[in-house]
Amino acid sequence: MTSRLATAARTGAAVLTFVLCAPAATALANPAVDAVEDFFAWARATGTTVADYESLTETGPNEAILRGARLAWKFDFEIFDQRIEAELSFDSPETRLFGASSDGDGVVFERFEQPGVHEVRLTGTITEDGKPQPLDLTVRQYDLVAENMYQAYWTLEEAPERPASRFIPLIRSGLRNSADSIFVRAIEATTQMPDGGRGTERQERITMTGLADGRLEEYRVGKSLSETRVEADDAGEPFSVRQEYGESISTGMDIKPVLRLLGVLPADQAVGERILDHSEFNDLRVSTPFFTAAISKASADGFEIDADAQPFDIFPLLDQALLGTFSETYAEDDLVALGRQALASLESVTVAKVDIGGIAANADEVTTSLDGMSLRDASYGGVGEFTLSGLSVRAVEQNTAVSLGRFRIADFDLPPLVSFLDFGLASQLREPTLTEILAVMPMLGRMEIEDVKVATDALSGPIALDRFRLSMRDFIAPIPTDIELRTEGLELPVSVIEEEDARQLFEALGLTAIRYDDEMRLRWDADDKTLTLDPMRMEIDGGGSIDMSIEIGGIPRIVFENPQQAQAAVATATINSARVEIRDAKLVSAFIAEQAAAADLSPETLALALADQGASALGPLRDTPFGQSLHGAMKAFLVKPDHLIVTVEPKAPVPAMQILGLVATTPSMLPGLLNAAVAANP
């Protein structure tokens, strides 16, 4: 909202400062008087419907006062099936010019004043499908004072065949404008939009300093207020949205990189990259009939456009749109090519950091607060880091409270924007292939969640999480070849378990809450083609733990480059080692005790019976040394489930194809080939 009004302010001031448009003049008896007269002559010659003033008084050799100036232009054109008929008018009651002089390319004023209220108004209609809708925008400027202001003469080409691009020389000439300082006491804007919405906006104590060569060193606004009336649909009532800002400051603003990106400046012109050094606002307050919100402070630093970015020349498109020949000029393939070019240009925009602090929102029965939100190294290509901290949500319903200490993602990379265009086009014709789906998959380097708490009367106890961490590295885009995951201190009330048998197991252990931890790392070594899962650990406090590891060799790169060919890995894959270790499995004891009670058996009797049943299921492996060892281990473990270890440690890697062959022919040879072993309660 602030930036929109700032733009209107600068535009209004620029046009009211009419000498911007003055053509180059010869020797001036009084540069101030002649600049005014030349400007109005130029305005009348370029199609104004009104161009007059009440008086022009010479007050010194290079000073003058202009009173009662009025200008108006009428526009009538059609764009994208919308007909726009409008009048742009300017009313300037008094302008004071001091210390005027001309260098042949523009006019400089030691001091420029516009006391009182100066008004810019755009009125008219926008007609679509034969239905005209009113448009009304009014901007009022109060008490402008500028010091050492230079206004370059505008150059406007007469080229009706280029209704938009003919303004390019005019825009370029504006880069020569300069001023030591410009102060405006206040600017107000009122808007009546075609959809029925109405808005008012006011900025106070506006100061601009150091304007030169398309760069503004500082733009400062003391206070801002806006109110927008939104027209609801047929089922709802209109409502208003009110926004208030404290002081806002922007420094180091430069329009040249934007103009180069849009084709206004030559592509080979060196204009730098930075478009904004720093911007901040303070004490934002938003109120609606549905909620109120506030932000203590927000800031952004380092907006840039890559100096090597390919420009997207938008003006030829605007020319064809205004001429009504857009669809005739650009076929579907042309539009796709333009879309690709536009998306490539967007990728060049980056911001170094964004920080927002002290966020709060209140609705009827919900209160939300957030200590801070930050963004680092952001662009259309991804985000270096995004962090939320100190989130709190409280709701009256069920006395619910949710809090989050921190949420963070890092190294989040998006594929080129053109990939999404290609995916959308392909999806319109057929089901996308796996390759096309992978082409639009993002890559995430790290995600962390810390200190989560949920409390509500709907649950018998709180839900909590100390920490969750996911990290992914060494991508063969977009698939990571190194994944690490860790969960610490996940706590859930037993009552949230929907499966009744499982819930009863925990209740049998006397647990009212479950505390869970896990850890996992899966990585692929590009040098030796080994895929390793180690560690893989899951633990339930008071319920037991399981540790697993496995190493598979012979996994080719093609598995990650083209997952559709993953089955080819079977031909080269080998089993190098594997291990499963279970400790303190109280859940197993609880299960056996519960089943034994239901069958009117002792837990030991049932445990032995289950071990015998499992041995019978081994088939050809039952009478092998490994089968007998496994049978004995299962008896010992099910009677007393303290510790069970199963290992596979072949003397040399065993090809997967050989294993599949033995499964089909002589499975009894597998345990020996794999050097499989099992032990219970060692």
Image (spheres, rainbow, N blue to C red):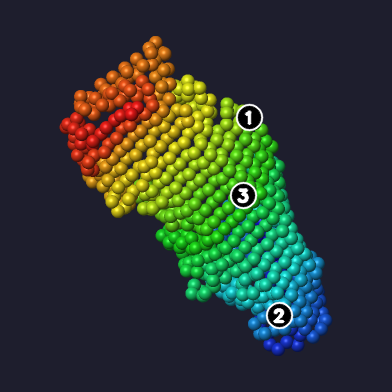
The earlier-in-sequence mark between 1 and 2 is 2
Front-lying residue, 291 or 140:
291
Front-lying residue, 271 or 454:
454
The earlier-in-sequence mark between 2 and 3 is 2
Q: Nearer the viewer, mark 1 or mark 3?
A: 3
Query: Is residue 170 shown above or below 512?
Result: below
Q: Which mark is residue 108?
A: 2
Which type of secondary structure does the marked residue at label 1 adopt?
helix
Tally of marks: 3
Q: Which mark is residue 372?
A: 3
**Residue in the picture at 29% in, 50% down:** 529
Name the quarter where the N terminus is drawn: bottom right
The residue to which callout 1 is attached is 398
How much space separates mark 1 and mark 2, taking CA atoms? Answer: 69 Å
Q: Is residue 488 left or right of residue 70?
A: left
Identified by mark 1, the residue type is: Gln
How much space separates mark 1 and mark 3, taking CA atoms? Answer: 27 Å
- Residue 483 visible in rendering: yes
Q: Quadrant of residue 613?
A: top left
Identified by mark 3, the residue type is: Gly
Front-lying residue, 573 or 203:
573
**Residue in the picture at 48% in, 67% down:** 309
Residue, far front: 682
Percent coordinates x, y for residue 315 in the rendering? 53, 67
**Residue in the picture at 43% in, 25% down:** 586
Q: Is residue 100 left or right of residue 380?
A: right
User: Dot 2: within a 10 Å radius of its alpha carbon, few (fewer than 14), some, or many (20 or more) residues?
Assistant: many
